[in-house]
Amino acid sequence: MPVPKPMERKQAAYSNLDERYAIQGEKYQGQQYSHIYFTRLHHMRNLLHALVPSWKPQLPVTTVLGLEEGKDCIIVGTLYKHMKLKPSILDEYAKERSAIPLVKPHNFMHPDDHLILEDESGRVTLAGAIPPAAFVTGVVVALHGKETSAGNFLVEDVLEAGLPPQSALSSAEDKYVVFISGLSVGSDTFNPLQFQLLIDHVTGHLGDENEQSIASNIVRIVVVGNSVHISPRFVNGQTVPSKDQSRIAEPIKELDIMLTQLVASLPVDMMPGCHDPANFSLPQQPLHRCLFSGASTYNTFSSCSNPHQFELDSVQFLGTSGQNIDDLYKYSDAKDKLEFMERTLRWRHLAPTAPNSLGCYPYTDKDPFLVESCPHVYFVGNQDKYETRLLEGQEKQKVRLISIPRFSESGVAVMLNLRNLECSTLSFSTSFDA
């Protein structure tokens, strides 16, 4: 019987582009968040001013302070969304709690919500053709309209920055990247057998020769946040008894054992999520390598930031562990999570609600969440279900949007082909029901 020929795993040129999200030279000296808004407005206003001549060339651009009643003009500024139901820290201390309306915990929208536009000169309440449900605080836009006798700005048209420029693609052969999210090792929903099936498939220990051939084309795995689940009773601010201290580390040790099997076979990027042992506010810094005593001994293991930006064979990737999209879901409305993702690209900002309702570092001279170049693949982890769509821009940009489901609940990982940006799912079930 002939000995089967060993298969070689394909390789892909990799560049980590997370430098912009690193908090190294920064010093916190009690600074406020106004700096990040000024930086955002300055950067986005320059972009929007350059687009105005091809949008409404006949109209003057003015400031909020320079508005004249009844005169058509364009103003550029940062949106603020006044929300009646937005949670307030003061509400927790209010005596008359019954006066606060009951709301669904997942969404804080109300019919009375309205938008305000703000620049350095002042602020003005907006009315007209700008639906509050589609926008959030922190988005920078240009508006065409006029001031009314009531002192409001009646909007006739809205200009967003649109998709940024995109580099050309040059990948010519089938190579795959696998995304897996929400492993939640240590939780009740985590099934070790399910994850082991994924590991065995990716490393070529499962399936026939055809499946192993496809597995050999997988060039990288990206673990997109919320990989461990530590019981809330251990992270409530109280001192953990010594007998329980070892139990905190158990999920991380279990994850490390499984990751070590993967990194022995192919490169793995590890992103933190909101439930992982990392800093809570964005950008989340890479998980410390000492947490992964086994996996970190391999040079194929990369601990990355959240957001995570990288390049594989000329394909540009950008992704988060889901906090930015989950926050948009609380404060605005869309038909699906992919529409929220599309909006962040059109606004050219990954996390517009930071720092208003999403925690972020108080930068003084930059806003790292500005999207300056258009990715080819934009992924978001820890979502309820798998969704994907190819977004096309006005300048022929093409972006593969991917919503990655929680693996512990769905048993689904996502596989992307670098050659044509087509997506498929890898589903692993351990159910033996008929």
Image: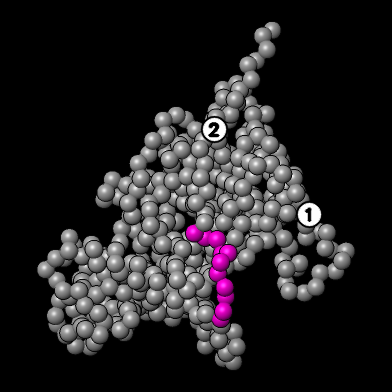
Q: State the image quarter where residue 149 is shown.
A: bottom left
Question: Farthest residue in the front direction?
Answer: 25
For the point 35% across and 41% down, which residue is it? Answer: 168
In the foreground, 10 or 423:
10
For the residues labelled 2 and 1, say whether their Cβ atoms are less than 8 Å apart: no
**Farthest-out residue, top:** 1
Query: Which residue shows up at 41% across the image and 74% down it?
Result: 37
**Residue 128 locus on image (x, y percent):** 24, 74
| Image coords of residue 1 (percent x, y) | 69, 7
Q: Is 134 within the magenta?
A: no
User: Residue 250: which disc?
Assistant: 1
- Residue 78 x/y as whole percent: 35, 74
Crowdedness near tag 2: few (<14), some (14–19) or many (≥20) residues, C-alpha within 10 Å: some
* Residue 289 in the figure: left or right of residue 79: right
Magenta part of the protein: which range? Answer: 20-30
Label annotation for residue 175: none
Which sits earlier in the primary sequence, circle 2 or circle 1?
A: 2
Residue 26: within the magenta? yes
- Which secondary structure, mark 2? loop
Q: Which residue is found at the position 49% from the left and 71% from the top?
A: 363
Q: Which residue lies furthest to the bottom in this view?
A: 95
Kindly report the distance in space between the C-alpha atoms of the residues bearing marks 2 and 1: 33 Å
Prevailing SS of the magenta stretch: loop
Q: Is residue 327 above or below residue 182?
A: below
- Quadrant of the image occupied by residue 113: bottom left
Amino acid type, residue under disc 1 in the picture: Glu
Q: Identity of the amino acid at label 2? A: Gln
Asked whether residue 175 is in view, the answer is yes
Residue under label 2: 11
Q: In the figure, is residue 94 to the left or right of 83? A: right
